[in-house]
């Protein structure tokens, strides 16, 4: 049952691993939760009805990309992204902060103005300020909005990381003012600081003073090792407010998610299920399977015997191997849907294990499996 105002309920913990629920006006989200990425208003290769049938309760869209194509004027005509793409459940939008890093050659940062971009599509210049990012997210009609931040590439330069925190904090304050007082929606702050515990704590404390509806760990999954990511999460994740959702941005593999849940993270997003699907890589309870491999040429078994999603259990590995080798679009569609379904099965099992106080056993079984 959805609730009108945004809220978060924490039901139980198994050591640091948390079981909870996010309530929004468009529905509830069981946590720990995985959000498939729909950068441009679509989770690549998957129909909305099929996405719902996987148990997906929330998806992610991207402010930078949606403001360029199709443009906020188009989305506004539909009163938001939900009607535009026929997705009636919650949507979280990234602020464009990640593109400041990933498209660093196409933008420059002005602390007072924001990020000055040259579009990766046509080179047209535009400014993405903290205020503009929130305005666009409001027009997209997101349920959870993210502050605009500076997400540095992987570095051990503490001065550079400190400057990013200063700018991100200033922008977070401006985002909070622009967001205003809307209890039906949520605004999340983004913690920076690289792999340094003291900088992460500094960033968190500054954001906590401003006050947000949830808190995200940014600047991870940018090239560091899994052990490095786990270490900083183990040191700092549990310092995040206990009564607010905790979100690790851009992560990741099933084992990445397991390690982060162990440290107390509630929300995840990643392009991996669909991106892997487009390259023939499937995630299963038996591990990762590269369906391009010729050993599957005569394999009659499906990826998941029990799957009832779109009759996925009727497609053999042999058939999928054939589709991949002949560059058929159906290959990426089937494998992408399978992967998203697996991720949601995986998250559902994590929640069951936390509830039954058996998460540590589950963690030990699967942490090195993927």
Image: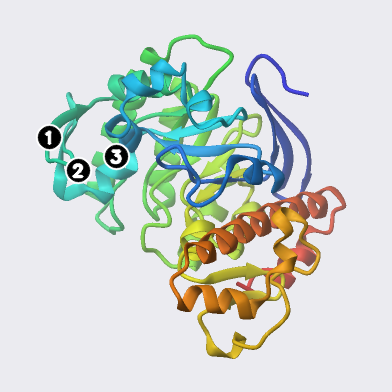
Q: Are marks 1 and 2 in contact (CB under 8 Å)?
A: yes
Q: Nearer the viewer, mark 3 or mark 1?
A: 1
The correct choice, above or below, for 183 with respect to 311 in the image is above
Q: Of marks 3 and 2, which one's residue comes earlier in the chain?
A: 2
Residue pictured at 61% horizontal, 62% vertical:
254
Distance from the alpha carbon under mark 3 to that under mark 1: 22 Å
Distance from the alpha carbon under mark 1 to that under mark 2: 8 Å
Q: Of marks 3 and 1, which one's residue comes earlier in the chain?
A: 1
Q: Residue 46, percent across and down? A: 55, 49
Q: Does residue 235 appear left or right of residue 96 in this picture?
A: right
* Element type at mark 1: loop
Distance from the alpha carbon under mark 3 to that under mark 2: 22 Å
Residue pictured at 63% horizontal, 45% vertical:
51
The answer to whether residue 199 is visible is: yes
In the picture, which quadrant includes the C terminus? bottom right
Q: Does residue 105 appear left or right of residue 59 in this picture?
A: left
Q: Residue 249, percent across and down? A: 47, 46
Q: Does residue 145 appear left or right of residue 10 in this picture?
A: left
Judging by the rendered image, the residue that carries numbered circle 3 is 150
Judging by the rendered image, the residue that carries numbered circle 2 is 121
Q: Are marks 3 and 2 in contact (CB under 8 Å)?
A: no
The correct choice, above or below, for 329 with respect to 320 in the image is above
Q: Residues within 10 Å of mark 1 (few under 14, many from 20)?
A: few
Q: Does residue 124 appear left or right of residue 352 in this picture?
A: left
Residue pictured at 58% horizontal, 74% vertical:
320
- Numbered badge on residue 124: 1
């Amino acid at each position: 049952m959805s609730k009108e105002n945004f809220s978060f309920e924490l039901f139980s913990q198994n050591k640091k691993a948390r079981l909870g629920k996010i309530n929004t006006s468009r529905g509830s989200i069981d946590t720990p939760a995985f959000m498939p990425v729909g950068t441009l208003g679509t989770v690549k290769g998957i129909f909305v009805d099929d996405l719902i049938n996987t148990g997906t309760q929330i998806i992610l869209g991207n402010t930078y990309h949606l403001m360029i194509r199709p443009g906020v004027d188009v989305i506004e005509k539909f009163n938001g992204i939900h009607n535009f793409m026929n997705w009636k459940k919650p949507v979280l939008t990234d602020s464009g902060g990640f593109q400041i890093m990933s498209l660093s050659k196409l933008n420059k940062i002005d602390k007072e103005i924001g990020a000055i971009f040259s579009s990766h599509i046509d080179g047209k210049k535009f400014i993405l300020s903290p205020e503009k990012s929130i305005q666009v997210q409001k027009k997209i009609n997101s349920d959870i909005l993210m502050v605009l931040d500076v997400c540095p590439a992987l570095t051990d330069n503490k001065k550079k990381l400190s400057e990013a925190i200063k700018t991100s904090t200033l922008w977070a304050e401006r985002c909070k003012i622009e967001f205003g007082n809307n209890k039906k929606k949520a605004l999340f702050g983004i913690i920076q600081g690289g792999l340094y515990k003291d900088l992460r704590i500094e960033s968190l404390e500054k954001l906590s003073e401003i006050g947000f509806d949830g808190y995200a760990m940014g600047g991870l999954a940018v090239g560091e090792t899994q052990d490095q990511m786990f270490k900083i999460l183990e040191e700092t994740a549990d310092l995040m407010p206990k009564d607010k959702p905790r979100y690790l941005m851009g992560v990741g593999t099933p084992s990445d998610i397991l390690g982060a849940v162990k440290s107390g993270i509630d929300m995840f997003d990643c392009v991996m299920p669909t991106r892997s699907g487009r390259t023939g890589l499937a995630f299963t309870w038996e591990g990762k399977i590269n369906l391009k491999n010729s050993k599957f040429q005569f394999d009659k078994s499906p990826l998941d015997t029990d799957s009832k999603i779109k009759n996925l259990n009727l497609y053999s590995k042999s058939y999928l191997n054939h589709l991949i080798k002949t560059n058929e679009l159906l290959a990426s569609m089937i494998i992408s849907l399978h992967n998203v379904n697996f991720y949601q099965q995986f998250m559902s099992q994590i929640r069951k294990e936390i509830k039954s106080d058996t998460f540590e056993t589950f963690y030990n079984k699967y942490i090195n499996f993927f």
